[in-house]
Amino acid sequence: MSSPCMVFLSETRLFGRRATNLRKRLGFDGMIHVDSEGRSGGIALLWRDAWHVSLRNFSRSHIDVDVISDSGDQWQFTGFYGPPKKKARRHAWDLLKRLRSNPEVPWICGGDFNEILSPSEVAGGGERSLNEMWAFREALDWCDLSDMDFVGPKLTWDNRRSGDANIQVRLDRFVANTSWRLKFRAAKVVVLDYWGSDHRAISLQLVPTRRNSNKPISRFFRFEPLWVKHEECPRIVEDSWKTLQLDGSPSCLVSGLTACAGSLRRWGSKTFGNIPRQVARLQKPSSFRVITKRPEGGELLRVADLMMGRNREWDKDKIESALWPVDQEIILSIPLGNASAGDKWAWYYDSKGLYKVRSGYRAIMDSKLTESSSSDNSDVPCWRKLWRLPIPPKTRLFVWRAFHEILPTMVSLRHRGIDCDILCPRCKDVMESSSHTIFDCPTSCAVWRRSRFWEKIEDRRARSFADFLRVLSTEVSSVDLALVCWLAWKLWSERNKVVHGGEVGYLKLNIDASVFPSSNHIGIGAAIRDDKGSFLGALAISVEGSFSPFVAECLALREGLRFAKEIECVDIVVETDAINVISAIKDNRELSTEGPILEDVKQLFAQVRSIGIHHIRRSANHVAHLLARFGFNSKCTNVWISETPSVVSNAVSIDDIA
């Protein structure tokens, strides 16, 4: 293999000066190194001066950079090291998802992922977890990253044992997004030899696509005027010339200029970072005050003059002719409602647009509200441990309600004056209290009996759920306490299914929005199905504008209801994974930015005779999510009537139809 321009190393087991010495021995000009923890870990990215590398971010699992090659091509590269421990890989995949930027930016990621994509990528040893493989595949799919084809041996890691004890796995790979593949169509991955490691090296070879050029194209040196304003700049120039032995010849002068340029480039990158990117970031209009051009003839424009059509859309031609570019994006990102209304004053620091003394105080003091506890002092140690448990907020809320005996059990409902049967709806034998539902009902006992907590449940020294948690919090670890809380919540959820059941004869509308911060449009997906799961209609569209995720979800809800109205669907239950949208609909937010959209939604709810709107898990909203992603990528309107869209045919079974 010829001398590489950039190398990513994992498991360096180096720190401090030892890493610097490695760079010098290998002959590289630049390096980013993350020190190891003791005798494990450590990653490094090394490159030569022919390539310009600027750091985006890093952690113990990754180094993310922007690269400009000697041919002038630019892309994002991420060197990734998956944790050896299975428990930590979920966090690693979440990290990988956060690294995704604009899908139009070419991005390639490579390294030791410590995970496989299919059972065919392992030889020997026991069976690998399908759930772990699925989590890895799902993360790559979310990031629009796909496995690169390769030349050479398939399996890249060998445990170096003989016979039946030998295990070989494909742990090392390159994955790239669509933009990168289109930019480097002739790129090739070659799997090399082991070279003193139990991992094979893998090489990414970029084939130049420029015409009539047999010589490598060097990157031009560009002097930044900002450099001369820094006090260290003269010293950098002076030191670079001091290292040379000048004899007055032209070749010596060229060598001196080259050395000086290299020193300035490295110093400028380290001191100022990527200046063009920082300038672009500062030019984002979201942080600027709106400054508009004076209209021709001196006439004042009203907001209504910038709208057009019955659907009250922004007139892009007028906006582009009358406003500066920094204002255009801000204006176009404001959603419009159908109903015309007069101007109103709105309070900027409140999500509903309403002024309150509390919000005014918070704006002045710029401080967060201090959380208050409703528990008495004796429960402080218990609640301190409960609030820190690694459980979802809905489970934590359930624990708080059960602790304070305010779950809507049959006994509790009778105390509130509601005429109902106080017997347990499952066993029909005993009055239903919180303690009975969670612990004593035969259905619950069958679950606890199979857990390692059965002895504590059977011998508990108190009758109430609160007393049980007080004792348990002093006897078990946080992990066990979290598991007890989760099991209790799950038992309560199963009880609710028995009590409330499912509605028959209704239609279900699932909606979702696909948003990428750096894009000027969003994708919206909607799916309408009957109680048997059959498709009545589906929608995947693109909407222009740089909207926040919350506003995008509001727009998705409105477009989904409009679609239901157009195809004459009524008696609809709406499902979304955006719980903040559900809260906004129940609140009075007419003065907020999204207020007009929410007013449209409320009117559409009445027109389609909506039964209600419910929050569901993201995993249960997979079909709408894929439709929204399809709408984002297609940048057009797609409608299906009485048929299952091909883009979601493989994912229909994932959704919770019941």
Image (cartoon, helix red, strand yellow):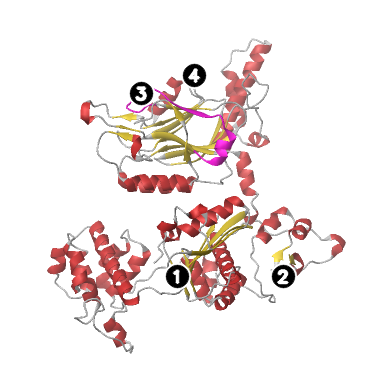
Q: Which mark is residue 310?
A: 2
Q: Which amino acid, by three-letter code, is at mark 2?
A: Arg
Q: What residue is shown at x 47% (from left), y 48% (from top)?
A: 142
Dot 4 lies on which element?
loop
User: Do we see residue 399 in this rendering?
Assistant: no
The residue tagged 3 is: 194
- Pair 1/4: label in front: 1
**Residue 545: x percent and y percent?**
64, 57
The residue tagged 4 is: 2
Does the CB distance between marks 2 and 3 fall below 8 Å? no
**Residue 628: x percent and y percent?**
54, 57
Spatial CA distance of label 1 from label 4 is 59 Å
Q: Please identify the residue farthest to the front as the structure is shown.
A: 642
Spatial CA distance of label 2 from label 3 is 67 Å
Q: Is residue 179 magenta?
A: yes
Q: Which amino acid, by three-letter code, is at mark 3?
A: Tyr
Using the image, determine if residue 632 lies above or below residue 616. Answer: above
Q: Earlier in the sequence, mark 1 or mark 3?
A: 3
Say few, some or many: other residues with alpha carbon within 10 Å of mark 2 (under 14 / 14 to 19 / 20 or more).
Answer: few
Dot 2 lies on which element?
loop
What span is in magenta?
Answer: 176-200
Q: Quadrant of residue 198?
A: top left
Q: Which amino acid, by three-letter code, is at mark 1?
A: His
Q: Is residue 16 left or right of residue 244?
A: left
Spatial CA distance of label 4 from label 2 is 64 Å
Say few, some or many: other residues with alpha carbon within 10 Å of mark 1 (under 14 / 14 to 19 / 20 or more).
Answer: some
Spatial CA distance of label 3 from label 4 is 16 Å
Q: Which amino acid, by three-letter code, is at mark 4?
A: Ser
Q: Is residue 382 magenta?
A: no
Spatial CA distance of label 1 from label 3 is 54 Å
Dot 3 lies on which element?
loop
